Image (tube, rainbow, N blue to C red):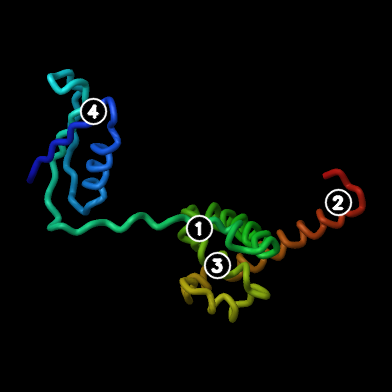
Amino acid sequence: MQFKIFNVPVLDPEPAMEEMNKFFRTNNKVLSVHREFVHGEQGLFWSFCVEYIDNGGFTLAYAKKETDYKEVLDDKTFAVFSRLRNVRKKIAQEDGTPVYSVCKNEELAEMAKLPDLTVANLRKVKGFGEKKIERYATRLQSYFAMLDDLCLSAEKQREQGCPF
């Protein structure tokens, strides 16, 4: 177990904050952080005492940037993706599981690009293996078809002047 102290001045804190943040991005296991506001000869500053276990110098990679599928997918594919998210949510609620256990956004985006949701096409989606096909394929297909029918019906109603 080791200790590292960071003093962050109230005026011009950026350099000290960057040093502290760089330390926290390492793979060191932080056990505790104690902070104290200090008024001393050096002026006003925050003092942080970090108790940690050294990792041997390895650094964590930055967190994976979340994909904005509205930017990545064309409008038509994004509309399908959005409907698939609703279907995934319904399935997850029925099963009492988190939505990501049904399928991840990356898998939904690949499904949205498929010409249709056949089992053969679902097999082509990376991460959507036999177990997921067995558990979810039938419901994905039927709920998506129902939602698609509702959307088409609503679109026709709008075309005919229905305000809803």
| Mark positioned earlier in the residue sequence (4 or 2) | 4
Specify the amino acid type for callout 2.
Answer: Arg
Residue that appears at 52% across and 67% down: 107
Mark 2 lies on a secondary structure that is: helix
| Mark positioned earlier in the residue sequence (1 or 2) | 1
Task: Look at discs 3 and 2 and give the one toward the viewer.
Answer: 2
Front-most of 142 and 53?
Answer: 53
| Mark positioned earlier in the residue sequence (4 or 3) | 4
Residue 133: mark in rendering: none
| Mark positioned earlier in the residue sequence (3 or 2) | 3
Task: Look at discs 1 and 3 and give the one toward the viewer.
Answer: 1
| Mark positioned earlier in the residue sequence (1 or 3) | 1
Task: Look at discs 1 and 2 and give the one toward the viewer.
Answer: 1
To which residue does mark 4 refer? Answer: 9
Specify the amino acid type for callout 4.
Answer: Pro
To which residue does mark 3 refer? Answer: 136
Specify the amino acid type for callout 3.
Answer: Tyr
Specify the amino acid type for callout 1.
Answer: Thr
- The span from disc 1 to disc 3 (Cα, nearest Å) is 24 Å
**CB under 8 Å between discs 4 and 2:** no
- The span from disc 1 to disc 2 (Cα, nearest Å) is 32 Å
Asked which quadrant contains residue 87, the reply is bottom right
- The span from disc 4 to disc 3 (Cα, nearest Å) is 55 Å
To which residue does mark 1 refer? Answer: 67
